[in-house]
Image (cartoon, rainbow, N blue to C red):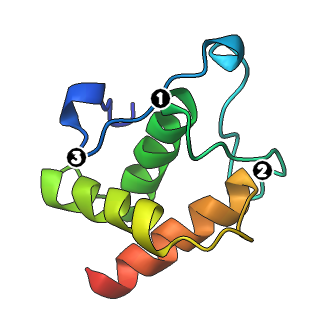
Amino acid sequence: MGLCIKPSDLKYKYPKVFETRYEQKLIGRDDPAPFNRDDLFDIIPMLEAAMDELGRDDGWTLHLLEDILNEDLPRFVNTRGEVFRFLTGSASEII
């Protein structure tokens, strides 16, 4: 079983898009679905998957991933798979 992140664990506050709350989220490295970087319900599964991929479960790594997501992620990176690969690649270089 993977890591479970709660909204209170996060460094930043994110809006919630309730209309898509129950839609399928990240399905893997090559997920072609668009990623909504302004939706808590998209962000938490992405961060959980990235933490699992990195084999980490600490707050420092979680906040590092959030900083990468909010400060370094280019706007042309827009599918879930691209965001996942960008997050894990960038974080693994820093870690």
* Badge nearest the viewer, 3 or 2: 3
* Cα distance between the residues tagged 1 and 2: 22 Å
Quadrant where the C terminus sits is: bottom left
Label 1 neighbourhood size at 10 Å, few (<14), some (14-19), many (20+)? few
Q: Which secondary structure, mark 3?
A: loop
Relative image position of residue 71 (x, y in whole percent): 41, 69
Label 2 neighbourhood size at 10 Å, few (<14), some (14-19), many (20+)? some
Q: Mark on residue 15?
A: 1
Relative image position of residue 46 (x, y in whole percent): 52, 45
Rendered residue at 54%/70% (across/down)? 73
Rendered residue at 78%/50% (across/down)? 31
Quadrant where the N terminus sits is: top left
Type of amino acid under label 1: Pro
Up-down relation of residue 74 to residue 53 (above or below): below
* Cα distance between the residues tagged 3 and 2: 26 Å
Rendered residue at 44%/36% (across/down)? 44
Residue 62 appears in the rendering = yes
* Badge nearest the viewer, 3 or 1: 1
The total of numbered circles placed on residues is 3
Type of amino acid under label 2: Asp
Relative image position of residue 6 (x, y in whole percent): 28, 26
Q: Which residue is mark 3?
A: 11
* Cα distance between the residues tagged 3 and 1: 13 Å
Rendered residue at 20%/28% (across/down)? 8
Q: Which residue is mark 2?
A: 31
Q: Is residue 42 left or right of residue 58?
A: right
Q: Is residue 50 left or right of residue 66?
A: right
Of the pair 55 and 23, the residue shown nearer to us: 23
Q: Are marks 3 and 2 in contact (CB under 8 Å)?
A: no
Of the pair 63 and 70, the residue shown nearer to us: 70
